[in-house]
């Protein structure tokens, strides 16, 4: 947490110096005035029905090569066990604060208490909750909070199992940003499918920036 505070402070100072060098606003308050004056004519609110929003998220996630399972809240534990069985994982790291009823006793769940990158790499995968999910972009948003944990925990293991509550699914990016305003100072990761990139020859490589495999359980 101390590191995050130092990073945020340094970032604010760098941005202040850039604004000052450009002859623009040199304070956060002045910058906000200009920010609020920007015309925003893009779509900012949902236009689909609730079920259509969930269908859109599922479609986007599958298109990005993620596996998706929709269950009621009481079935999350069984869904977790099935996903882990199907992927062949037995030992998985979880952040502190993850709901205990989501964990199946037949697997080994290791609570992250500052595990090193090498220790995380030795795990079969990671399981977390999520702060919000964006249907239009097929994005799951994770933050450094209870049930989601440190960013490194979701980037090093090769497999990520994420439980998203249906009440945390929104249709548009602006809706998600509005939800994140209260926790904007937390480390935040936007995940759109398994990690993948392409080189100059357009060869697609998975797992460069994070897990090669992503499973999502939509619960509710």
Image: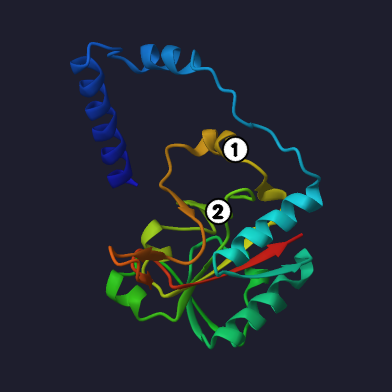
Alpha carbon of mark 1 to alpha carbon of mark 2: how far?
14 Å
Pinpoint residue 110: horizontal percent, then vertical percent: 46, 76
- For residue 97, what is the image quadrant? bottom right
- Tag shown at residue 153: none
Location of residue 188 with respect to 32 vertically, above or below: below
Q: Check the image and report above or below for 53 versus 107.
A: above
Image side of residue 46 versus residue 178, left or right: right
The image's colouring method is: rainbow
**Mark number, residue 139:** 2
Given residues 161 and 35, the one toward you in this image is 35
| Residue furthest front as drawn | 201
Q: Residues within 10 Å of mark 1 (few under 14, many from 20)?
A: some
Which residue is at a point 62% across and 48% down the rendered structure image? 136
User: What's the residue at 63%, 69% (across, down)?
Assistant: 100
| First reached walking from the N terminus: tag 1 or tag 2 | 2
Q: Quadrant of residue 57?
A: bottom right
Front in this rendered view, residue 170 or 58: 58
For label 1, the residue is 179
Task: Kindly identify the residue that appears in the image at 39 percent across and 14 percent down.
Answer: 29
Secondary-structure class at tag 2: strand
Decide: is 3 above or below 212.
above
Residue in view at x 46 percent, y 37 percent: 184
Q: Horizontal and vertical percent for residue 56?
A: 70, 54
């Amino acid at each position: 947490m101390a590191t995050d505070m130092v990073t945020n402070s340094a970032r604010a100072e760098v941005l202040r110096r850039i604004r000052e060098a450009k002859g623009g606003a040199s304070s956060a308050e002045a910058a906000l005035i200009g920010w609020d004056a920007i015309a925003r004519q893009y779509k900012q609110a949902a236009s689909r029905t609730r079920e259509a929003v969930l269908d859109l998220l599922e479609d986007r996630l599958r298109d990005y090569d993620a596996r998706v399972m929709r269950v009621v809240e009481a079935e999350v534990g069984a869904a977790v066990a099935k996903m882990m069985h199907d992927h062949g994982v037995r030992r998985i790291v979880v952040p502190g604060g993850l709901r205990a009823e989501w964990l199946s006793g037949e697997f080994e769940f290791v609570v992250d208490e500052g595990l090193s990158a090498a220790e995380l790499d030795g795990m079969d995968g990671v399981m977390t909750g999520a702060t919000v999910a964006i249907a239009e972009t097929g994005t799951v948003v994770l933050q450094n909070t209870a049930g989601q944990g440190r960013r490194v925990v979701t980037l090093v293991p090769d497999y990520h199992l994420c439980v998203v509550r249906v009440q945390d699914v929104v249709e548009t990016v602006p809706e998600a940003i509005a939800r994140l305003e209260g926790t904007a100072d937390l480390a935040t990761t936007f995940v759109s499918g398994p990690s993948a990139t392409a080189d100059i020859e357009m060869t697609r490589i998975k797992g460069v920036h994070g897990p090669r495999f992503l499973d999502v359980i939509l619960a509710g």
